[in-house]
Image: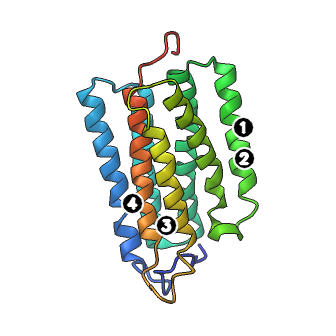
């Protein structure tokens, strides 16, 4: 239950000490709603798509809790849905879009998990943003595949990777800009990451499923 003072906007232990960081989590709910509408329009509301949309909602809820309560239990609810979304997206993309068998998709997902967990051992680097470098690498790799294989909207994932680079930069400089800009830049992280999640979900929605990838 210890209070965590991590981001620039927070000046004390009060419940609503990060109003902008808390309110900008609405972007995640907007992203989920847009994906839900798109899946309905395309009649593509599979179990995988529903799960990804639910995880986007969970990210919004978890981040809202953390930027409201700012304690250790809320941080778990903030970080866990993000990791689960990354793992689910990599698995679904490998299976549905690339068409890999279960073994290969599992190996890729576990390799990403290992890299993500290893990066968490260096919280002092990049203002605790090093943990998102494996996600950038994964998105760039899948984005190149998406482009080289001429998928529909081939630059979706490359664009998502570019936005994620910007998002990590904004998250990293939050503490550094605090003396000049007390609001910080973490709220911009929320807005850009919500766009990344939308682009990733859209890439799954617009890509035809490989035969046998059930």
Residue denoted by label 1: 111
Query: Callout 2 environment at 10 Å: few (<14), some (14 to 19), or many (20+)?
Result: some
Residue denoted by label 3: 66
Q: Nearer the viewer, residue 159 or 119?
A: 159
Instruction: Residue at 45% x, 55% y: name it.
Output: 193
> Residue 183: which quarter of the image?
bottom left
Q: Secondary structure at mark 4?
A: helix
Instruction: Residue at 75% x, 52% y: name it.
Output: 118
Contact, CB < 8 Å: mark 1 with mark 2?
A: yes
Which of the marked residues, 2 or 3, is nearer the chain's N terminus?
3
Query: Callout 4 environment at 10 Å: few (<14), some (14 to 19), or many (20+)?
Result: some
Residue 144 screen position, x and y as percent? 55, 35
> Residue 128: which quarter of the image?
bottom right
Instruction: Residue at 42% x, 58% y: name it.
Output: 192
Residue denoted by label 2: 115
Q: Mark 2 and mark 3: span between their CA atoms?
A: 24 Å
Does 191 sit above or below residue 208? below
Q: Mark 4 and mark 2: span between their CA atoms?
A: 25 Å
Which of the marked residues, 1 or 3, is nearer the chain's N terminus?
3
Left or right placement of residue 171 versus residue 46 in this view:
right
């Amino acid at each position: 239950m210890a209070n965590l003072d991590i981001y620039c906007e927070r000046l004390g232990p009060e419940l609503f000490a990060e109003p902008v960081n808390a309110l900008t989590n609405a972007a995640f709910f907007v992203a989920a709603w847009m994906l839900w509408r798109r899946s309905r329009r395309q009649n593509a509301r599979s179990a995988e798509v529903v799960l990804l949309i639910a995880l986007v909602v969970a990210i919004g809820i978890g981040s809202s809790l953390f930027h409201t309560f700012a304690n250790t239990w809320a941080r778990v609810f903030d970080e866990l849905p993000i990791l689960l979304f990354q793992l689910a997206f990599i698995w679904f993309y490998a299976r549905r879009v690339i068409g890999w068998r279960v073994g290969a998709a599992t190996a890729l997902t576990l390799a990403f998990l290992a890299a993500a967990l290893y990066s968490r051992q260096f919280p002092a680097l990049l203002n605790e943003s090093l943990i998102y470098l494996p996600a950038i690498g994964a998105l760039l790799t899948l984005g190149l595949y998406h482009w080289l294989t001429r998928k529909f909207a081939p630059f979706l994932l490359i664009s998502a990777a570019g936005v994620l680079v910007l998002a990590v930069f904004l998250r990293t400089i939050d503490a550094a800009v605090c003396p000049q800009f007390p609001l910080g830049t973490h709220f911009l992280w929320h807005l850009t990451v919500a766009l990344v999640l939308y682009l990733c979900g859209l890439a799954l929605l617009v890509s035809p499923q490989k035969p046998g990838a059930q």
